[in-house]
Image (cartoon, rainbow, N blue to C red):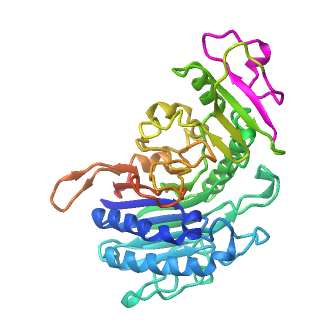
Amino acid sequence: MLKCLLLTSNIGSLISKPHLEPEWMQQICDVLATTQPDVFAIHLQEINGQVGSSHASRLENFLRTLLERIHLEHSSQRGFVIFNSEGTSVDDPEFAALGSIYWFRTDRHLIESWDYTACRFVPSTDEIVSRIPNNRLRKTSGSHFGTHLDQKRFPADMSPSGIASRKGFIRTRWRIDGCVVEFVNVHLFNDSDNVISVKEHPSIYAQCRARGMRWLMELINSDSLPGQHVAIFGDFNFRLNLPALLERLCHGEQASLSLELLGPDGTTCLHPLAPKDCEPDAASLNAKTSDQPMISNCDINPTVIIGRRVFDLHGVLSDRWKYSEDLLSFDTEMDVFADQLKELPITFPPSYPFDAASSNPHAYARTRCPAWCDRILFSPNMLAKLRPSIEPSGSTCPVTYDMLAKDSTVGDHKPVYLYFSLDTSPG
């Protein structure tokens, strides 16, 4: 059995707001110290911050601190570090602002890395592995990893805007005690305009994400090895079915809600969401997609305000996000890949967008509808190999799929992790 800890975190706001870094680091180190895994994999997105290369020096300090903290907490022998940070703009065809860190207990397990050009596994030597001797980071540039990784951006024609963006993936393949596992760090397209997102489902953004995932899965399948296992974890940017959610708010337990759309020029259109005891006319039935102000015979109580970067529920769901099982019914983007990718049941609140400026660690920013963007997915054969972890005391630790920093402020995204044992036996 192989004890594994997989973790994904979009650190864009963290790099931009360095005062949040200590708590984020502490959360990572706490779960690492508690689990003491044989394999520790971290996938990071937006490593250059939310505004690009202006935070290059911050990233260097962040990486150094993170690796030194991991080295102190984790008694592994080797670490493999990939940071796609040398590019500075979307004009760089390989720049995807992704970072992947892998640490292994090489004193207990045989670790080999796949060479994507030579098409063979090689032992994890210093030539392809970044190490921290004597608690000091010895920087290893991307060129040293050479062909032991595959990194690409999604083609521009898959983007909602039709132009290049810093969205893409990095993948590495490992053979651990004979078990082949490919780890994929991915960052999919985001919803840039809420007004467009509420008009239909799947939205144009969801359709682009689906195309990107199909392209990625085809690439993975094109050169996969027999019996290979795949774990894809990162910021998928999956969003809720917003038209259906708004319909639920209209016809559910709420009394009289309305939808206020903010136009790009600052104008406001009021779209009543007819409560179930009203008889809306034909135009009202299309309120979610109409570009014209609507009028209802019912009393209007403006509650939901939506603009390009505004999604203000005015507290309608503030007490429900923490206990959000019923809202998972609106999380449907994964359904398209249900035959290729699997996920453990979600029992944690949406991981995005938390208000990084708020003293309340549970507060969401009024910019996007909260959603489970940060996920950990598996190929079906890998999911079948997941086992509860056996602790040194002999007790069994259940497979844990959860969100860190539930009671702390660590940025707009909160890290999501999975702790389990992987059955590496054949079959």
Q: For the N terminus, give its image quadrant.
A: bottom left
Question: In the depicted view, which residue is nearer to us: 190 or 177?
Answer: 190
Residue 24 in view:
yes
Please tell me in which quadrant of the rendered image residue 7 appears.
Answer: bottom left
The residue depicted at 78 percent of the width and 13 percent of the height is 282
Whether 172 is drawn above or below 291: the answer is below
Please tell me in which quadrant of the rendered image residue 196 appears.
Answer: top right
Residue 145: x and y, percent? 58, 79
Give the main secondary structure, helix, strand or loop, of the magenta stretch: loop
Is 256 covered by the magenta stretch? Answer: no
Report the magenta residues as a range: 267-294
Residue 176 in view:
no
Whether 42 is drawn above or below 127: the answer is above
Residue 61: x and y, percent? 52, 81
Residue 413: x and y, percent? 53, 56
The residue depicted at 76 percent of the width and 52 percent of the height is 159
